[in-house]
Structures are given as C-alpha cells and as structure tokens.
Image (cartoon, rainbow, N blue to C red):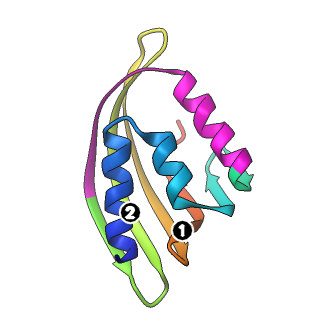
Amino acid sequence: MSNLEKAKNMYAQIGQGQLLEAFDSHYAESVIMEEPSGKREGKEACRAYEVQFLNNVEAFHNLEIKAISEDTEKSKVFIEVVMDITFKGGNRVQMEQVAVQQWEVGQIIHERFYYNAD
C-alpha cells in the first residue's frame, strides 16, 4: 500500500471519529508535529495534544479532503482538508488546513500543518 493510500485510509478513520486509532497506527514513535502554534516531539507528546484537542470538541460534523497528492521520490503526502467542528461552548468552526507528511517505513515521522492561526 502506498503512502498516499495509507493517508487516505487515515483520514477516512478520522472522518469516522477514530482520530486516536488513526494516530496510533500511522505515526512513528519519534514523530515530530509542527504547526503555527508550536512544535511537539515524540509520539507520547503528540498524542497527548490530540487528546487535549478532542476533549475540547463537542461535535464533529464533517471532514472533506479538498486535495491530496504524493511525491513518491521524497515519501511525502500533501493533504488539503476542511473540518466542520463544534467546540464545547457552542463555537462551530470550519477548520481549513494543509498537512505535509513525511513517511518512513509505513509511518509518519514528520508532519507540518499550515493554516491561518487568526
């Protein structure tokens, strides 16, 4: 299975509300995740961040992949995603982001998220 297919499967899991299951099976122990708000290193720290995010979600309405592509020579996958989420307290938002994933031996070793942090 290609990295592109693995990424599609991972986002299908996330769209079904299985974010932590997707995280556990697709991220390497030494993963580094970066975004405008900061950088996390190691699977345990990255997973704790995801748990904290989920604890603030009241309802997950939709996930739409706008575009997805792979650079097979560099083992990178690029994904443009829109998520419709209601956070606790009733704030419903459309989160738009691009993720650039570096894959190695079937798992993500580095992921950078690009989005408007305003």
The numbered mark, 2 or 1, whose residue comes first in the sequence reads 2
Q: 10 or 66, which lies in front?
A: 10
Range of magenta residues:
44-66
Q: Is disc 2 surrounded by few (<14), some (14 to 19) or many (20+) residues within 10 Å?
A: many
Where residue 79 appears, x then y in whole percent? Answer: 37, 61
Amino acid type at image mark 2: Ala
Residue 116 visible in the shown view: no
Where residue 50 appears, x then y in whole percent? Answer: 58, 38
Q: CA distance from mark 2 to mark 1?
A: 10 Å
Left or right? Give the position of 42 relative to 49.
Answer: right
- Give the labeled residue for mark 2: 7
52 is within the stretch colored magenta: yes
The quadrant in which the N terminus is found is bottom left
- Give the labeled residue for mark 1: 107
| Residue located 42% across and 16% down the image | 91
Where residue 22 appears, x then y in whole percent? Answer: 46, 49
Left or right? Give the position of 52 relative to 30.
Answer: left
When asked about the image quadrant of residue 9, the answer is bottom left
21 in relation to 3, above or below: above
Q: 67 or 30, which lies in front?
A: 30
